[in-house]
Image: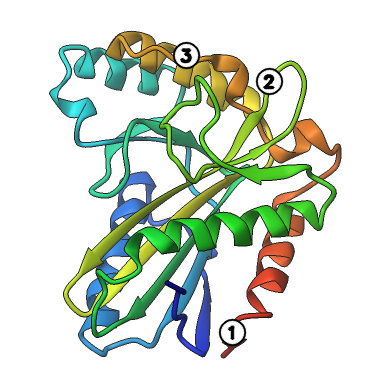
């Protein structure tokens, strides 16, 4: 089953942060507006404030309060997202890409979207020289079948995590691309996952610039738009 994209997407570059939690929730506000016909299909791109986005399952673990405290100690705001799995961390060195569009049957092709967008983002990273692939890597944080990773030594690095929310009449697909400054992300995840008593391999937390020196968020944004351009037009 293929993914049917809106033929035209409005590009919404969010230049100003609304705040860590507000940025996270604003995507769902936009989803409601697209569903109700108040906005066209759109591609929202922004650089988030330092955030640890916990999954719903994380909140039910005994160590959740400690994990929140660990996030704050590292200067990351602890937020709880309504889409996605385990905790993920990001900051201004990452690019968040939210694709939101109406659909008569939003549930159809839900899983196929993960594959499609995994391929799209790996294509964008490969255009910048990153040896990128799609699939869960052993020991990664917030594990997912369609994570995008970069092949590196001594371990592959998780570079893109994705999440999806589907409502009647529309769908929302959010992707976080880690481009610059992986050390703060790795450090906060070490302490938050320790507090949650979740096992993972910190060597899997990285950024695109760890594999190809000099890559910037601007470079990745341009590469993502170029990869999209073979599928859609932009308004």
The numbered dot on residue 232 is 1
The numbered dot on residue 190 is 3
Give the crowd class for mark 3: few <14, some 14-19, many >=20 residues within 10 Å: some
Task: Between label 2 and label 3, give the one nearer the viewer.
Answer: 2
Instruction: Estimate the spatial distance between the alpha carbons at disc 1 and disc 2, rounded to whole Å.
Output: 35 Å
Q: Quadrant of the N terminus?
A: bottom left
Mark closer to the chain start, 2 or 3:
2
Q: Position of residue 31 (x, y in %)?
A: 28, 71
Q: Quadrant of the C terminus?
A: bottom right
The residue that disc 2 covers is 155
At horizontal 52% and vertical 63% (from top left) the residue drawn is 116
Q: How many marks?
A: 3
Residue 163 left/right relative to 15: left
At horizontal 16% and vertical 75% (from top left) the residue drawn is 168
Instruction: Estimate the spatial distance between the alpha carbons at disc 2 and disc 3, rounded to whole Å.
Output: 16 Å
Mark closer to the chain start, 1 or 3:
3
Q: Nearer the viewer, residue 41 or 150?
A: 150
At horizontal 42% and vertical 34% (from top left) the residue drawn is 88
Q: Position of residue 181 (x, y in %)?
A: 67, 32
| The image quarter in which residue 61 lies | top left
Image position of 94 with respect to 139: above or below: below
């Amino acid at each position: 089953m293929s993914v049917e994209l809106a033929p035209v997407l409005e590009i919404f570059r969010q230049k100003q942060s609304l705040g860590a939690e507000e940025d996270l929730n604003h995507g769902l506000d936009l989803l409601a507006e697209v569903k109700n016909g108040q906005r066209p299909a759109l591609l929202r791109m922004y650089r988030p404030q330092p955030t640890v986005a916990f999954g719903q399952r994380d909140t039910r673990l005994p160590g959740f309060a400690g994990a929140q405290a660990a996030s704050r100690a590292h200067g990351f705001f602890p937020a709880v997202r309504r889409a996605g799995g385990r905790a993920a961390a990001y900051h201004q060195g990452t690019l968040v890409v939210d694709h939101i569009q109406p659909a008569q049957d939003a549930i159809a092709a839900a899983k196929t979207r993960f594959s499609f967008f995994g391929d799209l983002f790996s294509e964008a990273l490969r255009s910048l020289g990153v040896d990128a692939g799609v699939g869960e890597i052993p020991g990664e944080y917030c594990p997912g079948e369609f994570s995008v990773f970069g092949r590196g030594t001594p371990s592959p690095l998780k570079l893109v995590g994705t999440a999806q929310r589907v409502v009647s009449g529309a769908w929302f697909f959010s992707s976080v691309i880690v481009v610059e400054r992986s050390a703060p992300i790795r450090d906060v995840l070490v302490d938050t996952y320790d507090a949650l008593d979740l096992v993972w391999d910190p060597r899997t937390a990285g950024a695109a610039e760890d594999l190809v020196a000099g890559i910037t968020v601007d470079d990745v944004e341009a590469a993502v738009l170029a990869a999209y351009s073979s599928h859609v037009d932009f308004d």
